[in-house]
Image (tube, rainbow, N blue to C red):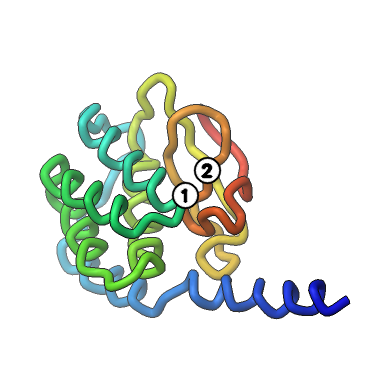
Amino acid sequence: MKRQFGFVLIIPLIFTFCSSGRTVAVEEELAEVQQPVEDGFQLSAALFDSYVDVQEALAVDSYEDAHNALEQLTYDSSGELQILVQTAMVAEDIEGIRSTFALISDRVAKSTLPEGYSLAFCPMANNFQGANWVQKGELIANPYFGVAMSTCGEIIKQ
């Protein structure tokens, strides 16, 4: 009974820490430089590889690996996407990276996915507003909850 009670207390904390007011501030900053993005544009293979390196690092709760992958993603991206990546790079913790990663993922998800990549969605991420991400393959690796809820989500597009 005590174990179940503790679990009930921990889950709301996870959701609280997974959302951040910083996301709103970043969106407001981008509104000034944002240009309409049409679905189906093409991103480079290097960008997808770097992006997935960040996604996989977040899925296993590795701040250091995520930060290193973001550094590479900075070189592979440009414009609005690069601004988001740079914002994620200055995050002091993994939750800060995750909140900006949701914005990065929104942009990447609008592109044409290369073969072998999937678009996934977790309805519980982003304070129950839901968030998507691009990953390799079909086995869910949730970057927003890491190992605590690594399989939360579903593939919505391949």
> Marks 2 and 1: CB-CB under 8 Å?
yes
Q: Give residue 32's quadrant in the image.
A: bottom left
Q: Nearer the viewer, residue 80 or 85?
A: 85
Residue 97: x and y, percent? 33, 63
Q: Which mark is residue 144?
A: none
> What residue type is disc 2 on?
Ala
Residue 118: x and y, percent? 48, 31
Horizontally, residue 138 falls left or right of residue 8, namely left
Q: Is residue 148 above or below residue 111?
A: below
Report crowding for label 2: few under 14, some 14 to 19, many 20 or more residues within 10 A (C-alpha).
many
Quadrant in which the N terminus appears: bottom right
Secondary structure of the residue carrying tag 2 is: loop
Residue 59: x and y, percent? 47, 49
Instruction: Name the residue: 62% across, 41% down.
Output: 154
Q: Which mark is residue 141?
A: 2
Horizontally, residue 133 falls left or right of residue 148, namely left
Q: Is residue 90 above or below residue 156?
A: below
Secondary structure of the residue carrying tag 1 is: helix
> What residue type is disc 1 on?
Ala
Q: Is residue 16 above or below residue 87?
A: below
Instruction: Name the residue: 25% across, 56% down.
Output: 67
Residue located beneath label 1 in the image: 59
Report crowding for label 1: few under 14, some 14 to 19, many 20 or more residues within 10 A (C-alpha).
many
Instruction: Name the residue: 53% across, 32% down.
Output: 157
Q: Report the Cα–Cα distance between label 2 and label 1.
A: 6 Å
Q: Residue furthest top?
A: 115
Q: Nearer the viewer, residue 145 or 122?
A: 145
N-terminal of the two: label 2 or label 1?
1
